[in-house]
Amino acid sequence: MSTAGAATRRDSFYGRRKGHALRASQADTLTRVLDALRVDTAIAAPHDLRDLFEAAVDDVALEIGFGGGEHLLHRASAEPATGRIGAEPFVNGMAKAAAAIDAGRPGNLRLFDRDAAELLDWLPSASLSVVDLLYPDPWHKRRHWKRRFVSPANLDRIARVLKPGGLFRFASDIPSYVDWTLIAVMAHPHFAWTAEDADDWRLPFPGWPGTRYEQKAIREGRRGTYLTFSRI
């Protein structure tokens, strides 16, 4: 697909791109951080995706829709040998993450502020070790379920960019989205669910720091489900 086509496609992101207006200082920080760390899909992807990063890294992970960046930044700090790309089209979420990044910019982090489908189409095949989709917008109304990020087209994209044995990790507190994801991923020929007992989906992923969305779910009496699928 041409870069122009990717840049204008809107087949996987729905909803607001902006919330309340940013303060001038927030906008300045966001611009500065994105200028330094934004992945530019207008140019060809490097043959070795590790070359995107300032620091030397062993592998690369992608987080789709990172919200305020709590999980993304924790992982970047705790796992310096892994390069991380965070995709988040919502301006206010990106601004919150940018403020934290600006205070101590890690060399193993890059950012993308548009539709994650565009980024997935740009990435080289078999270039990622992990793709995280954590507490995504559930689109509660049945007529909106088609807007959920988990779809056959996006699973094809994720399968293409994951290395054999790479992991697709999904977390949600919405039972209908968990069921939706299990049905869709288990029907895909290139994924296998790794669960061996109930704790494998009841307990968070190893190294999980918690997120504000998870805390909101807990306050409201909902429990998260944590699904891990392997690329086969």
Image (cartoon, rainbow, N blue to C red):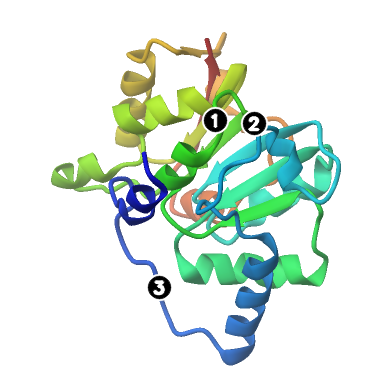
**Dot 2: what SS?**
loop
**Residue 205: assigned label:** 2
Q: Is there a contact, CB below 8 Å, between mark 2 and mark 1?
A: yes
Q: Position of residue 141 (x, y in %)?
A: 19, 48
Q: Which residue is mark 3?
A: 18
Q: Amino acid at mark 2?
A: Phe
The residue lying at 47 percent from left, 23 percent from top is 159
The residue lying at 80 percent from left, 63 percent from top is 105
Between disc 1 and disc 3, whose residue precedes? 3
Q: Amino acid at mark 3?
A: Lys
Q: Is residue 85 above or below residue 82?
A: below
Q: Which residue is mark 1?
A: 169
Q: Is residue 200 above or below residue 5?
A: above
Q: Which quadrant holds residue 70?
A: bottom right
Q: Is residue 107 left or right of residue 85?
A: right
Placement of the N terminus among the 4 image quadrants: top left
The residue lying at 36 percent from left, 28 percent from top is 181
Q: Position of residue 52 (x, y in %)?
A: 71, 46
Q: Amino acid at mark 1?
A: Arg
Between disc 2 and disc 1, whose residue precedes? 1
Residue count near mark 3 (Cα–Cα under 10 Å), binned few <14, some 14–19, many ≥20:
few
Q: Position of residue 136 (x, y in %)?
A: 43, 46
Q: Which quadrant holds residue 204?
A: top right
Q: Is residue 170 left or right of residue 156?
A: right
Residue count near mark 1 (Cα–Cα under 10 Å), binned few <14, some 14–19, many ≥20:
some
**Residue 96: assigned label:** none
Between disc 3 and disc 2, whose residue precedes? 3
Mark in the foreground, 3 or 2: 3
